[in-house]
């Protein structure tokens, strides 16, 4: 049942993406409720999946890479739903849908959804650490999406090659503001997540992954400070937000879980 | 019931003739009311703009309706004779109106102002009691057609003049322009038009610098801006978001070397440079600086031409949409649907002439 919800959700995001591509290819795009409804339905299905999985496990559903990818996708859509209407960033959903589709279809097709008995008992600090960190990565993922959109828009403005997509991309100043704020929010959340992790003691502090996570935290810290204080150009912030999200993906790739087979 | 149209437009008549037939805004309702009482005519709407004067009527009989319409125009204005005047039977009249409201008959293809003008003309006619079932249905349908065409094609997409291209680009960079400061270097006609287009979008403030301070002051007063001495423009430059260069200087007024340190102090604040001068006022190398977007007159014109080409490419799709709506309207209008199909099908290009 829970896997079916995930398949439905993945198709919703595929639909949202396909609809936008079709509209842009036909050179007639307009912000459609259909697109938002698809994303909203996908989000509800994701939420239901995570809820059911959490009920089954009796803990936050972050016990394997499969679940982490779904949780990350959920966080990404959550931020989109929060920030999209606030900034009226048209096409943000169109750029978000393919990333979510990629994460979820990758999880469904390539990542084993093995459930094994957790080595560590449910623990408030552990759950807080894992959940908040992945939500922070969701904010970084959306910052990456906004960064890609910024770079696409900027390139068109610089080269004077105005494609029809130009008229649907948000103004670069709005994208720059959204990008910087998402990085700041993500950094604040990651700070809380890492702080909670340190409460776990040596099982956390002696992990090489923790060292890498601290590197990611520092990277975003520098980016949040320089971008937030407007000390570097939005173009550099956009490039760095894309590159830094690569580091996040490496972190997720290196994750070992709270199972019998891993330390953390 | 027949729908007839008689009129002249910028396609067929010079301005000297159009102005002879033009009807002031305040009178179109009364004229439509009088026309609807003419022999053979049941309902009427009069559209009068600077580019066209058109009379739409609903009549029981086409020949009698047209005769009554011609007689009315002759008595009220002047005889509608000669090649400058066109008249259409039901099918072509409906198609013509749909094309007019969609901007396909406009001087600037795809412009949207005409829709507002036709809406106003229809409202005046309705208020004066000149319309009833048939023209009400026709004009409401026409407004739906215009919406359909505008929403589902690119006929209104993009800027088709230098000024609107500049405004479009500014909005792609800054979003709303309410917080933007504009500086004009050189009080020329093109820079005034461009600044005027930006001002219409609500820019915060405008500085004008010109070699002749009096001209700067005159333009600044016209635009509710601030005149500055040309030698001092760089002092006010730090807060500028949009720079319009339009001086007669034979060399670059702003170079990359001058601008780089300024941009360094405001890395997160973009600068949009519009260079309308020939020779150019702004060194093309400034476009390589982070956060600086430079457009000269050629690149703006090229964007405008590209947009116009996009609009032209949309014509076929627009025509197909209009045809579909016209046939649907015909089906409603005719008692016998087969008659409607005959009446509205395009058998010959000139079909429909009375």
Image (cartoon, helix red, strand yellow):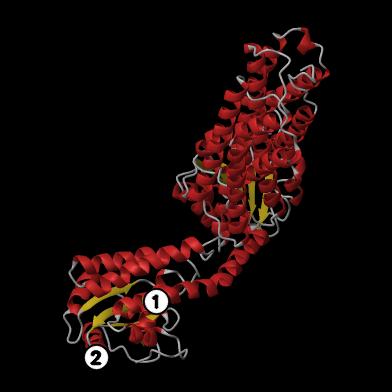
Q: Quadrant of the N terminus of chain B?
A: bottom left
Crowding at mark 1 (Cα within 10 Å: few <14, some 14-19, many 20+):
many
In front: B15, or A55? Answer: A55
Crowding at mark 2 (Cα within 10 Å: few <14, some 14-19, many 20+):
some
Residue A56 drawn above or below residue B86: above
Q: Position of residue A225 (x, y in %)?
A: 68, 23
Residue A29 drawn above or below residue A228: below
Mark 2 belongs to chain: B
Question: Does residue A56 show up?
Answer: yes
Residue B110 drawn above or below residue A180: below
Determine the secondary structure under disc 2: helix
On the image, which quarter does residue A248 sit in?
top right
Q: Position of residue B147 (x, y in %)?
A: 42, 63
Determine the secondary structure under disc 1: helix
What residue is shown at x 38% (from left), y 72% (from top)? B50
Q: Position of residue A50 (x, y in %)?
A: 59, 30
Q: Which mark is residue B102?
A: none
Residue where numbered disc 2 is placed: B67
Residue where numbered disc 1 is placed: B326
Give the mark nearest the N terminus, 2 or 1: 2
């Amino acid at each position: 049942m829970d896997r079916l919800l995930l398949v439905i959700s993945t198709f919703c995001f595929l639909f949202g993406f396909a609809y936008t591509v079709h509209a842009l290819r036909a050179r007639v795009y307009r912000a459609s409720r259909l697109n938002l409804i698809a994303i909203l339905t996908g989000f509800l299905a994701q939420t239901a999946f995570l809820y059911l999985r959490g009920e089954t496990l009796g803990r936050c559903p972050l016990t394997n890479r499969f679940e982490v990818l779904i949780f990350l996708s959920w966080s990404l859509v959550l931020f989109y739903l929060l920030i999209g209407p606030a900034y009226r960033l048209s096409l943000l959903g169109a750029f978000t849908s393919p990333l979510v589709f990629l994460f979820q279809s990758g999880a469904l097709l390539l990542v084993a959804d093995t459930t094994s008995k957790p080595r560590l008992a449910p623990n408030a600090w552990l759950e807080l650490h894992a959940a908040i960190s992945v939500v922070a990565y969701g904010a970084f993922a959306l910052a990456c999406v906004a960064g890609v959109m910024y770079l696409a828009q900027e390139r068109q403005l610089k080269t004077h090659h105005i494609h029809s997509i130009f008229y649907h991309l948000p103004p670069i100043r709005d994208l720059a503001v959204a990008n910087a704020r998402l990085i700041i929010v993500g950094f604040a959340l990651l700070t809380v997540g890492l702080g909670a992790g340190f409460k776990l003691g040596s099982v956390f502090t002696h992990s090489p992954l923790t060292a890498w996570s601290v590197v990611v935290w520092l990277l975003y810290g520098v980016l949040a400070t320089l971008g937030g204080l407007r000390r570097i150009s939005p173009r550099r912030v956009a490039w760095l937000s894309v590159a830094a999200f690569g580091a996040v993906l490496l972190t997720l790739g290196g994750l070992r879980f709270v199972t019998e087979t891993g330390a953390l | 019931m027949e729908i007839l149209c008689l009129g002249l437009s910028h396609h067929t008549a010079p301005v000297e003739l159009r102005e002879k037939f033009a009807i002031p805004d305040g009178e179109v309702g009364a004229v439509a009311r009088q026309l609807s009482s003419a022999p053979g005519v049941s309902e009427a709407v009069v559209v009068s703009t600077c580019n066209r004067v058109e009379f739409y009527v609903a009549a029981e009989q086409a020949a009698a309706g047209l005769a009554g319409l011609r007689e009315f125009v002759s008595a009220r204005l002047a005889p509608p004779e000669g090649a400058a005047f066109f008249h259409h039977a039901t099918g072509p009249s409906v198609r013509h109106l749909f094309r007019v409201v969609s901007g396909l008959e406009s001087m600037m293809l795809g412009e949207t102002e005409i829709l507002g003008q036709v809406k106003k003309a229809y409202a005046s006619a309705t208020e004066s009691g000149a319309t009833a079932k048939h023209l009400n249905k026709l004009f409401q349908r026409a407004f739906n057609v215009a919406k359909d065409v505008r929403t589902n094609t690119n006929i209104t997409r993009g800027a088709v003049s230098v000024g609107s291209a500049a405004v479009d680009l500014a909005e792609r960079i800054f979003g709303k322009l309410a917080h933007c400061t504009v500086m004009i270097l050189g009080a020329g006609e093109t820079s005034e038009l461009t600044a005027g287009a930006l001002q219409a979008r609500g820019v915060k403030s405008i500085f004008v610098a010109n070699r002749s301070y009096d001209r700067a002051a005159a333009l600044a007063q016209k635009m509710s801006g601030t005149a500055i001495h040309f030698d001092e423009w760089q002092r006010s430059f730090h807060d500028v978001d949009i720079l319009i260069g339009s001086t007669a200087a034979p060399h670059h007024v702003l170079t990359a070397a001058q601008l780089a340190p300024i941009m360094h102090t405001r890395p997160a604040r973009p600068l949009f440079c519009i260079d309308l001068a020939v020779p150019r006022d702004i060194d093309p190398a400034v476009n390589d600086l982070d956060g600086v977007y430079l457009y000269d007159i050629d690149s703006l014109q090229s964007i405008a031409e590209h947009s116009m080409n996009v609009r032209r490419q949309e014509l076929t799709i627009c025509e197909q949409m209009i045809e579909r709506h016209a046939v649907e309207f015909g089906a409603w209008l005719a008692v016998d649907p087969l008659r409607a199909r005959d009446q509205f099908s395009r058998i010959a290009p000139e079909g429909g002439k009375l």
